[in-house]
Amino acid sequence: MAEGTYASTLNMHYGRKGLGDRIIAALRQAGKDPDSITTDDLSPVAEFHIGGQAATLELAQSAGMGAGMRVLDIGSGLGGPARTLAQHYGCKVAGLDLTEEFCRVATMLTELCGMHERVSFMHGNALDIPFENASFDLVWTQQAGANIENKLRLYQEVNRVLAVGGRLVFQEVLRGPETPLHLPVPWAREGGLSFLQPPDAIRDLLARAGFREMIWHDVTAQYIDEYRKLAARTSDPGGPPPLGIHLILGPEAGEMRRNVVRNLEEQRIVLIQGVLKKS
């Protein structure tokens, strides 16, 4: 798929217009005042990766994050992880995402949370990161790699923008031993947006890009039960909770989450958390 066509398809998948208005309406429905919201209030919709905010905090603890660190969040979405990292660890986070609507809404939500001085967002391509060499102490990404085909270029770009001794910290859905993938899933309605590789291939690419592995955990079993419950709530006949992935992906969200459960149960996908150091 040509780069322009791919970006357009990705924006259509994630970037449904009016997303910000839908989130504001859902906050009010949930009894929240949009003018005094917190990162935690937004997490059900803004941290829609497997494990949600709990997975973000666990991964951050493993990464050894600290105050004052310069962090780049690739595939920053609606800014949930970026705001969580800034709030809990005192770091300054720049988010990068290829979906224009995500960047616009993430900026709006961050301003409503009063965190715009510590967290910012930019529309851009992770294969051509718009920052200078050695700009960051840590690069963070949660499940953005599923939509990126040229993973070696991604990891090389991450290595370039990291300072000496900097770390790449990620949570990724990777391909399991069984195929094919049950579709649709949250990152792809059809195969043209899903680029999963098996763990061994990813480890090889990371080493080729100049990274040394510090932590590599398969956390599939840890999060699958919670995701089953989340999928059931999303598919509730009485309607999903006000805040959730359905605000982004529409009425297919329930089917997408049920398919994630099937794919996890049948070993078609695995969930990996990793911390790697720039060599």
Image (spheres, rainbow, N blue to C red):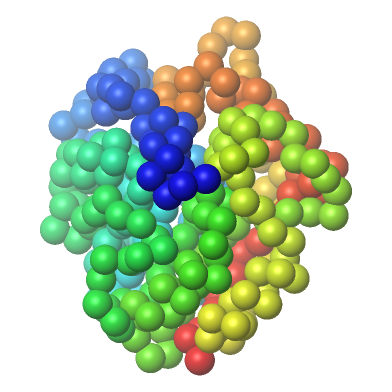
Q: Residue 74 at x, y = what percent?
A: 40, 59
- In depth, the one of 178 and 42 nearer the eye is 178
Q: Residue 144 at x, y = what percent?
A: 50, 53
Position above or below: 123 against 263: below
- In depth, the one of 241 and 140 nearer the eye is 140
Image quarter of residue 119: bottom left
Position above or below: 232 against 36: above
Q: Residue at x 66, y 61 (%)?
A: 272
Image quarter of residue 21: top left
Q: Residue at x 46, y 32 (%)?
A: 13
Q: Is 104 displayed left or right of 82 in the figure?
A: left
Position above or below: 97 against 260: below
The answer, for residue 90, to whether it is visible in the render is no
- In depth, the one of 154 and 52 nearer the eye is 154
- In depth, the one of 212 and 109 nearer the eye is 212
Q: Residue at x 35, y 51 (%)?
A: 97
Q: Is 158 displayed left or right of 172 in the figure?
A: left
How many numbered marks does the figure carry? 0
Q: Residue furthest front?
A: 2
Q: Residue 39 at x, y = what percent?
A: 32, 45
Q: Residue at x 35, y 42 (%)?
A: 99
